[in-house]
Amino acid sequence: MTSASTPRTVLVTGGNRGIGYAIAEEFVAQGHRVAVTSRTGEGGPAGALTVKGDVTDTASIDAAFTEVENELGPVEVVVANAGITRDMLLMRMGEDDFTSVVDTNLTGAFRVVKRASKGMLKARFGRIVLISSVVGLYGGPGQANYSASKAALVGFARSISRELGARGITANVVAPGFIETDMTAELPEAQQAEYKKSIPAGRYGSAAEVAKVVAWISSDDAAYITGAVVPVDGGLGMGH
Ligand code: NDP
């Protein structure tokens, strides 16, 4: 353990690659009991339990939690990380392009957090971390669906904070900027170069840099932080 934080049972959705994988790795390194969900049931980092779970399917999430609870005990820290993009200009965006992104990024977080909250209420302890994006509050051309889904996580976290704050449960949003993962690799090169120019830090971030912040906001040290939006974006979204 690098801090005085109590070892916890942690569940990270979409922990088979990218930011979720790095978050799970960090919790493992800090000595916690860690599980990840992936759609295939494979692919989490060493030292973590990988279970099958699709955030668009309530029954699948329920089964994933039950498996984790049986193996590692009640989930005390949940990180709703699974997310998708389906970028296109509003004029071309079909209803399914919008609702499928919302279903994964927002309703998916709802399914996961609702299931997690049962055990947290019983334990009178919990850490809920929602992975949003700088694009949630900054906006992004071609990302009306994604941006809306990520902005909504802020209201979601703040309502949970107000409902569950007195029960020892915190709910915070971590809003990464541009992080080197499969998701950003898909962006056209010209757009990537343009984004780098507007980032005060002058570079993309790493998944590990996001993971450190998620682990800290889930730690004992962060007990009095709830309803916050913590940017990890090299200054890109200053002020949100
Ligand atoms: P990746 O595309 O690398 O990984 C996305 C993860 O989400 C994968 O594990 C994927 O699983 C999982 N996932 C997608 N849909 C579902 C689903 N229905 N059920 C369960 N898991 C699912 O993305 P990143 O690591 O880059 O992004 C992780 C989070 O961080 C996302 O919420 C994203 O919006 C956010 N973010 C990313 C930024 C970046 O610059 N990369 C910036 C800001 C925010 P599978 O392998 O099965 O597809």
Image (tube, grey):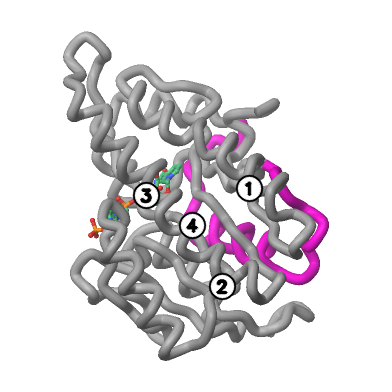
Q: Residues within 10 Å of mark 2 (few under 14, many from 20)?
A: some
Q: Residue furthest top?
A: 91
Q: Which of 90/166 is in front?
A: 166
Q: Quadrant of the C terminus?
A: top right
Measured in 3D between alpha carbons, the distance from the residue under mark 1 to the one under mark 2, in whole angstroms, is 15 Å
| Pointer 1 or 3: first along the chain | 3
Q: Is residue 69 magenta?
A: no
The residue that mark 4 highlights is: 114
Q: Position of residue 61 (x, y in %)?
A: 33, 65
| Pointer 3 or 4: first along the chain | 3
| Pointer 4 or 1: first along the chain | 4
* Residue in view at x 35 percent, y 47 percent: 83
The residue that mark 1 highlights is: 160
Q: Amino acid at mark 1?
A: Ile
Q: Position of residue 121 (x, y in %)?
A: 64, 67
**C-beta proximity under 8 Å, tags 4 and 2:** no
The residue that mark 2 highlights is: 119
> Is 43 on the left-hand or right-hand side of 158?
left
**C-beta proximity under 8 Å, tags 4 and 1:** no
**The quarter of the displayed image where residue 89 is located:** top left
Measured in 3D between alpha carbons, the distance from the residue under mark 2 to the one under mark 3, in whole angstroms, is 18 Å
The residue that mark 3 highlights is: 108
